[in-house]
Amino acid sequence: MDIISDSLQETITGWAEQLIGVPLSALGGHPIPVLTPDREPQRDHPLVIIRCDDGSALVATQDLCEAIRPVMPELHADLVFSPFGTYEIARVTLPLGITIWGPSFYLFGDRNTVRPASDERVVQVGESELEEVDYSIFWHCQQNALAGFAVYEGDEVAALATVTSHGEPVWEIGMETHPDAQTRGLGHAVVNAAANWILENDRIVLATVGTFNIPSARTLRSVGLRYAFMTIDGRPGPFMVQPQPLGSPRAGETLYNYYPDWAITKGILPRPK
């Protein structure tokens, strides 16, 4: 099954409502409801747009809601959750110092979905090992993690997954594979080990992934995580352009740029350090 089960959805509903700051029953059709939180949301950014099943909502601070509300009747949810929609909303929020990022998939797993871990290459690593990691490479992982799971090649980390709390009962996996060690199943191995460790501790497994990141989405689904909803986030900072889709439809496929170089956006700067 490609989507989350009813039982797992029921388990995470309260968690999701705390994340966004409104009940899921407040989600609606067109125009997307623009709401302020009715509780203290468990997130570190002032704006979130959620789409779950056929319902959507934008939840933000009062000043952001006032700025965005006039444009929402012109944006169907299908448009909002697209590059066009993120640019249109960013056009309103950037003057207020808020950039837009997304959409991102939220995938969850429990004992009924996650596959058993069986890869003997994976070792659990502790605080001292995590301190030695180069996080400019393993940038989707966290040093201050509850646990880490790694595959080493020689003395070097080839793949790493870390586990952090995302508000009870949900623990989140962040994963990265070294650029020289990709396409060999190492990401699957460390994510699977991390997911099973989370279940051993009686928590729900979460991982988030950008819609453009096909390899990571495939890895998470192969472990047994299932899609529940997607979000677009608004947070302070400069506007970050998402990459072209990562990966390939299938191994060995030749890929071509559809647009000529002269038609591609110019003047995009490297990611700030």
Image: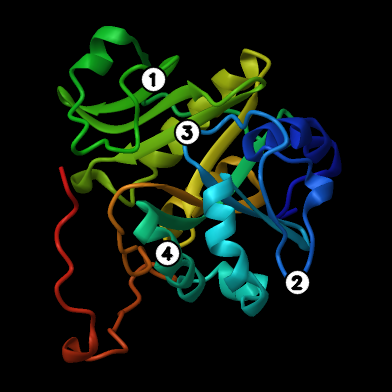
Q: In the rendered structure, which amino acid carries the disc numbered 4?
A: Ala
Label 1 neighbourhood size at 10 Å, few (<14), some (14-19), many (20+)?
A: many
| On-image quarter of the C terminus | top left
**Residue position for label 1:** 148
Instruction: Point out residue 226 in the picture as x, y percentages from the top left corner.
Output: 66, 46
- Asked whether 216 or 121 is in front, the reply is 216
**Residue position for label 2:** 30
For image coordinates 39% across by 20% down, the residue present is: 148
Discs 4, 1 touching: Cβ within 8 Å: no
Can residue 221 be seen? no
Secondary structure at badge 3 equals loop
Question: Gap in Å between the C-alphas at discs 4 and 2?
Answer: 20 Å
- Asked whether 227 or 185 is in front, the reply is 227
Nearest to N terminus: mark 1 or mark 3: 3
Discs 1, 2 touching: Cβ within 8 Å: no
Q: Is residue 139 left or right of residue 21?
A: left
**Residue position for label 3:** 44
Label 2 neighbourhood size at 10 Å, few (<14), some (14-19), many (20+)?
A: some
Total tally of numbered discs in the picture: 4
**Residue position for label 4:** 90
Secondary structure at badge 1 equals strand
Res. 170 image quadrant: top right
Instruction: Point out residue 103 in the picture as x, y percentages from the top left corner.
Output: 51, 58
Label 3 neighbourhood size at 10 Å, few (<14), some (14-19), many (20+)?
A: few
Q: In the rendered structure, which amino acid carries the disc numbered 2?
A: His
Nearest to N terminus: mark 4 or mark 1: 4
Nearest to N terminus: mark 2 or mark 3: 2
